[in-house]
Every structure is written in C-alpha cells, then in structure tokens.
Amino acid sequence: MAVGLMGGWIPSWPKFALGSLFPHFFFAQLKYRGGEWDPNPLFAEAIVEELELRTSIDARKARRVMQLSDRDLFFCPFLYMAGRYEFEPFTQQEREVLRRFLTYGGFLFAEDTVGAKGFGFDQAFRREMRAVLPGYELKRLSSEHSVYQSFYLIGSFGGRQRVNPYLEGITIDNWTPVIYSQNDLSGAWSRDRFGKWLHACVPGGEPQRKAAFKMGINIIVYSLTSDYKRDVIHHPFIKRRQNL
Amino acid sequence: MNVNPITIAPVFPLWLIMLLFCLALAQAAAQCVKSWTKLGPGRALVISLLRFTAIVVVVIFALNPSVVTRKEHRISPAIAIIVDTSKSMGQSVAGGKASRLGEAKALLMEGGSSLIESLSKKYEVHVYGLADSLRPLEFGDVARLQAAGRKGDVSAALRAISDRNSVAVLLSDGNVKWNESQAQQLPVVSVPFGDPETYQDILIKGISAPSIAFRDREVTIDVTLKNYGYTDLTLPVLLKDSGRLLSAKNIRVQTNPGESSVAFSFVPSEVGQKNLSVSIPQQVGERIVDNNQVNLSIKVVRDKTRILMVSGNPSMNYRFMRTALKSDPSIDLLSFVILRTPSDILNVRSYEQSLIPFPVKTLFLTELTNFDLLIFDNFNYALYLRPEHLESIRRFVEDGGSFAMVGGPNLFDEGRYGLSPIGDILPVRFVESEFYRRDPSVRVRLSPAGAKHPILRFGGEYREGDAGPDLLWREMSPLDGVNLMEAKKSATVLLETAQGITWPILTVSEKGKGRVLALTTDYAWKWYMGMVASGKGNQLYLMFVHRMVRWLTKDPSLDLVQMILPETTASTGQETDVRIRFQDGVPSRISDAAVSFSVFNPEGVKIDSKLKPSPQPGEYIVSFLPQNGGIFRIKVETPVGQLEESMVVAGPLEGLDAGPAHDRLQKISTSTGGKYMPRKDELTKQIEQYAQKAEKQFVEEKRVPLWATAFVMAVVLALLSSEWYLRRRWGLI
C-alpha cells in the first residue's frame, strides 16, 4: 500500500506519454476466445506507478487490449496474457502470428491466476505453447536466470498466492521470450480507485505483495534489457551481493 | 654388312602347308600313273612335271622366304652446359677482378681451347642459363649473360633436359635449389665458382612474421641471420617502425659459417598498415651491404570491435540494438543501462538490488581509448558526466575513435549538449525550443546522399522483394518520436523525415580522425518489428546496425574501393600488379578517366604506372615497375572514394645469400653419378670420359621378300596353262 501511494508524491523523471502510440513500456493484454481473458482488470496502475517510482523506465499506465489478429501486435513487445479457465485453441493463423512474434523479439508474460496445475488455463496455455513453439517447452527458470537479477536480486517469490517458488519460461538461445507464473502476480498488484488492494496475499501477507511487485519490475526490466545482467562486468558484482 | 640366310615366314601353319604339299604330290603321282598307259612315259612325265612344279611354286610362296640385312650405327652423345645466372653469381671473386659469372663465361668462351669449342668438335653441345627458369641459349648468348635471377632449381632443370642430353656440366657457386629425392640418371659434372675461404658477409636470411596482426595482441617477429667469415662477434639487430626504433637486440655470432636467431615482440596499439624494417650494421670487409636490411609490412586489424554503449533507460530501442550488436560475433559489447536515476526511489537495501555503480571515471578518463565506438542511447549526460569526461570523449573522437548518439527525450537534455564538448563533435545541433516530439508518427526517406552512402547501400546483401532502396525506407514503420535537430554544414544527412518539416533522422560526419553519427529517434526498433510484422525477416535492421558500426569504426570491408596487394613480396625490376576492386553497389560504369592511380617510390617520388584491363567486372589492375626496394605507396582516387595503401618491394640484393656453397655442388655430382671438378685443367678430358660412356649404338635391320605375289601367280598360271594345253593336244581332255 505504502509503496503504491508514495509513487504519487515523489517527482519522477519527466515522462512523455502525451499521445504516443507506443511508449517505451505499456501492458498489451491479449484477449482470446473462451475462458476469462481479464481476471484482474485493475492490475496495471499500481505496478506501472511502482515501475516509474523505482526505475528510469518511461511507461504508461493505460493498458492496450490486443488480439492476435491485430496489426499493431508487433509494436507491443510486452504482451501480457492471463486467465482462470481453459480457453479455445488458437487458430493456425493465430499460432503462426504468435510464433513469429515470439521468435523475432516479442515477449509474452502469462499468468494462471488460479494456480491449478494441469487444469483450466494452465492446461490450455501449455497446449498452446507446445503448438506455437514446437520443440521448446516451458521449463523452470534457474535461480541464475537474468529475470531474477534484472533489477532486484530476487530472494522470495511473491504473488496473490504462492503456488510455485519459481517462474517458468521458454528459452531460445539466450533470450526467454515466454515467462509464465501461477502465483497471480497481477492479483497482488490489483487495487481499486481508492488505493485499496483488491486481494489479500496468502499466506505471506504484505511482504508477499512486495515481493510480487519486485518480481513484476524484474520481468518488465528483463523484457527491455534481455540478458544484459549476464554481461561480464555485472556478473561479479551480482555474485558478490548474492553471497552477502 | 652381314647377309643372313634366307628366312621363311609361312603365311599358313607349316604343318598345313606340308599336308597340302603331300596331297598335291600324291595327286600328281596318281595322275602320272593314270596317263602313263595312254600317252606313254615321256608325255606322262612332262604333264606330271608341270603339275609338280606348279605345286612346288605354290608351296614356296606359302613359306614366304625373305632376305634380312642388318646395319650397325653409333650415336654421338649430347652434352648440356648449365650456367647458373642467379644474383649470387654476380659477386666478385677474390681479388675483385671479375664476377663468378664472368669467370664461368671465360671458361666457356675464351682462349683457343675454350670448353664449348673443344666439346662441340666431337659432341653436340647444348647451353642453358639457369636462374628463375631454365633458358636454352645460343653460343653467342653466353657473352651477354647477366647475374640477375633468383636461385635456380637444378632438379627441375635436369628433369627437363635428361631426354636430350647424356651428361650435364653445371657451372655454379652452389646457390641453387637441389632436391636429392628427384635426382635424375644424368651425370652432372659440377664446376665451382667463388671462394668460400675468403668470402665475408652477414645477412638477414629470413624473417618470420604474420602479414596480419591483431591490435593489442603481441606480435612476434623471428629473425634469422647468416654469417660468412666472421666469428666471436656481437651484432645489434634493430627493429624499426617507419624509421623509428621500436626495439633492438644483441646477437652473438660464433661459428663460421653459421646461423643465429633472434625474436622481437611488440604489441601494436593502432589499426592500420605497419611498415617495419629489420637491420644490422655493416661490418668491415662485408661483400654485400644491401642484404643487411629487410622491410616488411604488417596489417594491424582489430580482432573485435569494442563498443561501449550507455543507455539512458531500459527501452525497446536498447534491447533491439543490443540484439543486433550481439548478433555480430566480431563485436565485443560492454553496455550500461541507467536502470534508476537519482530521482527514482530505492525501496530496498543496496545488496537486494542488482544495480552496480556507473564507473564514469574509469570508463571515460582511463579506458575510453580501449574502445572503438562509444554509443549514447537516449542518455542524459548531465546527471553523470563532468566536463572533463565530455572533453575526454571529444579527444577520443578527434584522435580516431567513433561516437554515435541515439535519440530520445533525454538525448540532448534540452540543448545542453550543444554547449558541451560533445556538441562540438556532433553532426547535428539543437534548433527548436521543442527538442523532442512524439506525435504525430512520421515516416522516413533516403536523402540523395543517403542513397550513395555505404551505411545505407545494402547492395547485394539485401534483396528482399523488388523494392528499390528509397521505397524500402518509405515503407518502413513510422517513428513515434524524433528529435528536432538541424544538421551542421559539415555533416551529411542520410535519412530524413518524409512528412511535414524535414528533420534529419540519420546524420553522419567526420571529426578529426574519427567519425560521428546521430540517429535522432528512439523508435528505430519499429523498423525491426515492422519488417517482421510484414512477413519479412529482421535482416534489414541487423544489417543497418552492423553497417553503422562498420562505417563508424572505418571497417575496410565497407570501403567502396578496395585494394588487393600481391600475395608474395614484390621484387625490384619485376612488373608488379595491384588490383583495385569496387564494392557491389558502386555504379557499374565508372569511366577509366575518372579513376586515377598514383604510385610513389620509397623516396616519395611518383613513378610511372599503367592501367591494365581486368577480366573481373568492377576491377582495375594497376601495374608498375619498381626500380628499387623499400616501401611503396599506392593511392587510388575515384568518384566514390579514395584509398591509400603501402606495400613492400624487396631490394635487388635483399635477403641474398651469396656464400659459395660448394658442398652442395659436390652433393649434386655424387647423387647423379657425376664428378665435382674444382680443377678446370682436366675438365674437358673428364667430360669426354662421361660422354664416351654414354655413347650409344643400334642395329638397323632390313627384310627383303624374295617372292612378289603377282610374279608367283603368273608362274603358277603359266605352268597350269601349259599342262592344260598339252593335255588337250594329246587328247586327254
């Protein structure tokens, strides 16, 4: 709560959101057929405020809703996808578009907000990933992955719920274009217009929410910097701090 | 002449002939008995005799008798005289009156009993000159021979002449190539010239050095010296770079003759052509001085292009540019992204975040010169860099580094860059109160200069679709943000906005020895994803970034004009060809008059050169004749660019090892079954002995048939006709 509110009081670096079509960062949420594509409609504001407060990233709070058939999809390099239930399979054309998007530099962060392994959204999402990127599979991202070091050094895993103490992802060469969570990070970020959190974080309470914000920022920074933290000059610093 | 007995060569098997003969004889006997009672004994015998005679004639014909005559012939052997005309034969002999070649010519031609005259009386004599190749000579050519070529290959020469000659005479100082495994069965009588006992010289015999070296990596040059006539001597060996002493080492000369080695190591710090020389001082009594120095040229290239990139914040522009830079294995990228500005609030203790200090002092004051290219990507310098850092960047560029400024709202920090040392080197300047604009999005187009510039002339590398380069850029995704800048007069705009007021988007210029570039947008990444969205690959964007880097760092692969030097070191007095090649994308028709070449000798004087046709399109050949050794400069000027390279031409006596190698001559004679002949008074006699051994003879055999076919047929017919006539007359028919 405090984290979110502080964002309004502290002057941050001037932003140029104006009427820009594609600012440096914004959430482009994927709308799909079947299931429930928008389980946490109020998630974006708090995490973007936090992003602006803590980092130098130029971001916009308003999210854009995209479908795989939208022409602008390729100009929304951070694609967000969430859901609770099983959804209809993508068409072959949609799969081809998503494959091209992910193969050539796009990024997808997906969330199963229920956290039911092997059921509902989880089952459907894994099915689609197998079809979109055959030969690649969602794997647990090791603790050495750049996403855990891109801004914060992640020590604990937050979210509205704590289903997995890890993120999963599909890695192609040194880049992970798909990151998947079942901890409902967006549920932990969601708040109403009066600043009240919409969901309690269980079982860890507010520290778990704080960890969810940290993870959210790390995922966003990773999407904009790739494996930059693996560069030789950064790695020794990070290892030294992790060993403290 | 011997006449051998008549020989037979039966046309049928002998048993068949005998069988037929017996049958015919029996038939003639039976006929005789039968006609005996009718005609009486006299007439019966006549008829039978005629038949018998005809049979005998046929049998003799079948036996094919002939007379064989044999005649013996003797062949006088041919003698090959091989005169070594390599450069070492030009050395004077002890006393300095004549050269080794002069002595050899005197032996061949002078005096009443010259070698050629003596031998040609009895034998066929062939004379050859041997240096770079084996040349047949007329007797009259011998007097005009000059010592001018490189070491000749005796093995190859003997192979070439062994079928026409029976013995070879080699006149040489022993400085020849000899491969014993290829020895021929042609005896070589070798005649030595020069005196190993009195010969004195120290030379640089060999240098082992790479033709290409990498900047900041140690280069080793191995030098081998050879000495004749000196012992217990300490010699300084000097390594110089364009006349400036780079290193010196002492070497101890102990044995005579002997070889010594020394190795030099140095680390080249600058990219480009290095003209080096290795030399030793002249010694008292030294016969050749020109072989005391060897020039060599090493091309220093960068192993990797080292780039320092500072990005003002995490952005798509950073990520896609990083992707492009990382996709080139020749690029070594060190990047810093400002993840948090001083105004951003950190909510955790420092050890819980991954941010590292931005080492500005180290990067911009100490280590900057170790990079080839510095990129500021939407970076607000005012928060981090002090004037001395900016001054250091300016010096870095003016001294040959390169600098790229990628746009964004932070780029020019509301114009403050313009007043800084960086503003001095940038190709653009701030002109409006509004320095950055995001709306409306705008497309770009190629400027006339951009269409010709190496960065944007993808040429044969990119041929997706049929779109011309201008249409290609017009169809690129529009940019959502541009910096409103004005190009300086000294700059060249390559890309500009295509709508509304024209603003430069990609501008380049040169500053001092370095190059600078301004890409005044933070939305170039949309070109990448726009191409992907339209179903094409990301190659165009990757090439765009790679070519920007290559142009900025003066990578020769992007030069429109390239010079290809000879693979082997050129030599004095030999026509030397240098190829000039135009890169793909240069207008195919550049008139010859528009291309000018200049060749300068080591003294800096322009020398004659000529243009020769090349079978390769877009290629010229410059040909020149170096008259002396040293570093030559070749300068090419064309409408699309100019280029200057230097090359080493070996001097006439550079590396010449003229020490008499009589032991090699002994080896040649021994392995071919010939004789080493230091005493010339018995030379003619010795050669004649070998020639007599090689004399050959053969027997000519002639076969004359005794029976002609038509004659035999006529005899047989006459006998049988007579028999028929008598039979008819005597009433048997």
Image: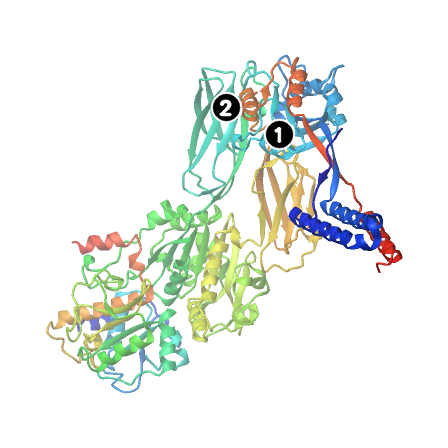
Left/right of residue B478 with respect to residue B92 in the rendered view:
left
Query: Front-most of B683 and A46?
Result: B683
- Residue located at (32% from left, 75% from top): A79
Chain hosting mark 2: B
Check the picture and name the quadrant holding the C terminus of chain B. bottom right
Check the picture and name the quadrant holding the N terminus of chain B. top right
- Residue located at (39% from left, 69% from top): A104
Query: Front-most of B20 and B283?
Result: B20
Query: Front-most of B689 and B335?
Result: B689
* Furthest residue in direction right, as rendered: B729
Chain hosting mark 1: B
Left/right of residue B628 with respect to residue A149 in the rendered view:
right
Q: Which mark is residue B226?
A: 2
Residue B557 sits above or below residue B692 on the image: below
Q: Are marks 1 and 2 in contact (CB under 8 Å)?
A: no
What amino acid does circle 2 point to?
Lys
Which residue is denoted by mark 1 in the rendering? Answer: B652
- Residue located at (63% from left, 52% from top): B619
Place of residue B116 in the rendered image (x, y in percent of width and height, measured from the top left): 72, 21
Image quarter of residue B665: top right
